[in-house]
Image (tube, grey):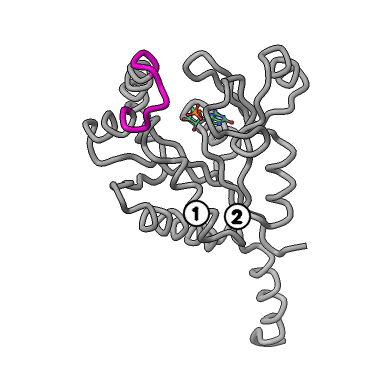
Amino acid sequence: MNKQRGILAIISGFSGAGKGTLVKEIFSTYAENYSLSISATTRQPREGEVDGVQYFFMDKPVFEQKIQENQFLEYAQYVDNYYGTPKDFVFDKLDQGISVILEIEMQGALKVKEQYPETVLIFVTPPTAEELEARLRGRGTETDEVIASRLARAAEEVVYMDKYDYVVLNEDGKVAECAAKVHHIIETEKKRTMYSGQLINELTEGLARYKKGE
Ligand code: 5GP
């Protein structure tokens, strides 16, 4: 068993902020450090998406059954679909000392933080609203209506941005830099004394014999 419990980090950001690309970059560059939780969703797969890779795709009744069975760490409704994080996977990894990154929207992120305050919340955003719109349009996978509802959602979400622990800018063409910043944040968090209980105990024991008068 690893000495230190893994860190639970959540990456959120407006739809179109480049989270998907960022998360891919983190997992390819820092593969040995993290485990990625795969969410369940009721939305339709986009072209190229594969069940069990980007998401576990399922129908609404199946998702609702899993809610009843308390199988989600959190779940949320986002633009008419359910999205949820399978609970067992996350806790197993953290217990094994492996840090887990969740890429989830804000409602879910804040729910997890409320329950587990040690969760590290990282918000990723392009530098301007105009760039966000341009990226959403450039993706070319969504209708105008869906784009409009995602931008409207961003306008609602921005109000809660300050509830996050960190904000990281994801500038065009700088995904490797952005991934390095996120990795650095998580590495720094690991050094918090609350994760070093065992080390502190060992040092205390090891130093006991040097105490004056003993
Ligand atoms: P998309 O449909 O673009 O893949 O995802 C839409 C939103 O759902 C994104 O903001 C994404 O971060 C969020 N999301 C993905 N998985 C989960 C999850 O398990 N729980 C929550 N709360 N949000 C999720």
Outermost front residue: 47
The reply, left or right, for residue 60 in relation to residue 181 is right
Q: Earlier in the sequence, mark 1 or mark 2?
A: 1
Q: Is residue 212 above or below residue 13?
A: below
Q: CA distance from mark 1 to mark 2?
A: 9 Å
Dot 1, crowdedness within 10 Å: few (<14), some or many (≥20)?
A: many
Do labels 1 and 2 touch, CB within 8 Å? Answer: yes
Q: Amino acid at mark 1?
A: Ile
Res 26 label: 1
Q: Which residue is mark 2?
A: 34
Residue 81 pos. (x, y %): 55, 17
Q: Is residue 186 above or below residue 69?
A: below
Residue 163 pos. (x, y %): 40, 35
Provide the secondary structure element on which disc 1 rests.
Answer: helix
In the rendered image, which quarter is residue 38 located in? top right
Q: Is residue 136 above or below residue 103?
A: above
Q: Residue at x 39, y 40 (%)?
A: 18
The reply, left or right, for residue 17 in relation to residue 104 is left
Residue 132 pos. (x, y %): 29, 33
Q: Main secondary structure of the magenta part?
A: helix
| Part of the protein shown in magenta | 137-146
Q: Residue at x 64, y 86 (%)?
A: 212
Of 114 and 79, nearer the camera is: 79
Instruction: Please state, as top left, top right, bottom left or bottom right, where the N terminus lies in the image.
Output: bottom right
Provide the secondary structure element on which disc 2 rests.
Answer: strand
Judge whether residue 86 is colored magenta: no
Q: Amino acid at mark 2?
A: Tyr
In the rendered image, which quarter is residue 153 located in? top left
